[in-house]
Image: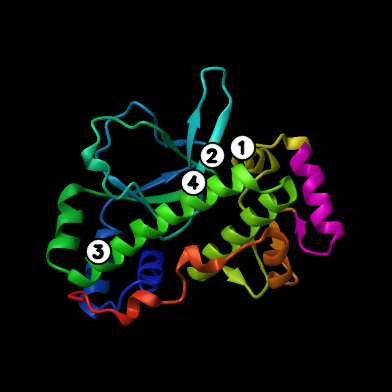
């Protein structure tokens, strides 16, 4: 079984055959399928499961009282939504599907089994939590300091690299899950401004976006345009050089 959670966690720790087997079991016991633009869990609801994205794309978001929405995180296959969610009595944000998704619902008992008996998995999950925080910091910088051109380019770089890390790219292209409205809700721009920015990126030869396929002819050039530093994603297998007891 090609399991995206295993693909992701192997960037952070050396997983044994037993580790992989227990991850496969945990991510296949309780599955939930949603269509695009459905709530995985809404603000105010009591969380009962850690949601693991197995396929498709989801997002974390907040709605203002007047209906405006800010997307504050993406979830791609292999991502766990709110690893320590059981602490909360109710959700203070919503998680929704962007495309059709398959979600594995991991119970408190399943999470305890993963972490208490499998130190390598625990180490990998620590890394996963640290990387999620690093991504959030980078998004704050993106909104606060980068130009519209740099913001959109940065989002394209990040999502492409995260999809590549779990084997969901094909050379320089990938299936692109976001609409221009969703990019606008992510970058704090209007849909019209996003459209204009994408046209600028195309004219510069940095991206080709046709339908639902994104192609990045020169990733290094796009990174340079976005002032993108890959280090915050920690995709260099740094954690694999550490033992669970280090």
Tags 3 and 1 in contact by the CB under 8 Å rule? no
Q: Which residue position is annotated with label 3?
A: 25
Q: Nearer the viewer, residue 148 or 105?
A: 148
Q: CA distance from mark 2 to mark 4?
A: 6 Å
Q: Which mark is residue 185?
A: 1
Instruction: Report whether residue 137 is seen.
Output: yes
Q: Nearer the viewer, mark 3 or mark 1?
A: 1
Q: Which residue position is annotated with label 4?
A: 73
Indicate yes or no whether the magenta region holds residue 207.
Answer: yes
Indicate yes or no whether the magenta region holds residue 204.
Answer: yes
Task: Looking at the image, tell me whether mark 4 or mark 1 is earlier in sequence order.
Answer: 4
Name which quarter of the figure residue 192 lies in.
top right
Name which quarter of the figure residue 229 lies in.
bottom right
Which residue is most to the left?
Answer: 117
Q: Secondary structure at mark 3?
A: helix
Tags 2 and 4 in contact by the CB under 8 Å rule? yes
Name which quarter of the figure residue 118 lies in.
bottom left
Residue 101 image offset from top left, x and y in percent: 47, 49
Say if 180 sits above or below 1 in the image: above
Q: CA distance from mark 4 to mark 1?
A: 11 Å
């Amino acid at each position: 079984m090609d399991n995206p959670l295993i693909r992701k966690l192997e960037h952070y720790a050396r997983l044994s055959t037993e580790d992989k087997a227990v991850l496969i079991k945990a991510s296949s016991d309780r599955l939930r399928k949603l269509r695009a633009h459905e709530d995985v869990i809404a603000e105010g609801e009591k969380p009962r499961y850690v949601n693991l994205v197995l396929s498709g794309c989801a997002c974390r978001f907040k709605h203002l009282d007047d209906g405006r929405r800010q997307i504050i995180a993406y979830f791609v296959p292999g991502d766990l939504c709110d690893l320590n969610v059981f602490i909360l009595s109710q959700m203070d944000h919503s998680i929704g599907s962007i495309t059709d998704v398959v979600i594995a619902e991991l119970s408190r008992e399943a999470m305890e089994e993963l972490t208490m008996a499998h130190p390598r998995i625990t180490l990998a999950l620590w890394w996963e939590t640290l990387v999620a925080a690093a991504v959030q910091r980078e998004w704050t910088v993106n909104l606060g300091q980068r130009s519209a051109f740099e913001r959109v380019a940065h989002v394209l770089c990040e999502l492409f690299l995260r999809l590549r890390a779990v084997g969901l790219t094909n050379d320089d292209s990938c299936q692109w899950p976001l609409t221009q409205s969703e990019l606008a809700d992510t970058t704090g721009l209007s849909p019209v401004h996003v459209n204009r920015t994408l046209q600028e990126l195309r004219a510069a030869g940095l991206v080709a976006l046709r339908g639902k396929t994104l192609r990045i002819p020169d990733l290094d050039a796009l990174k340079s345009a976005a002032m993108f530093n890959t280090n915050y994603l920690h995709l260099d297998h740094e954690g694999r050089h550490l033992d669970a007891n280090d």
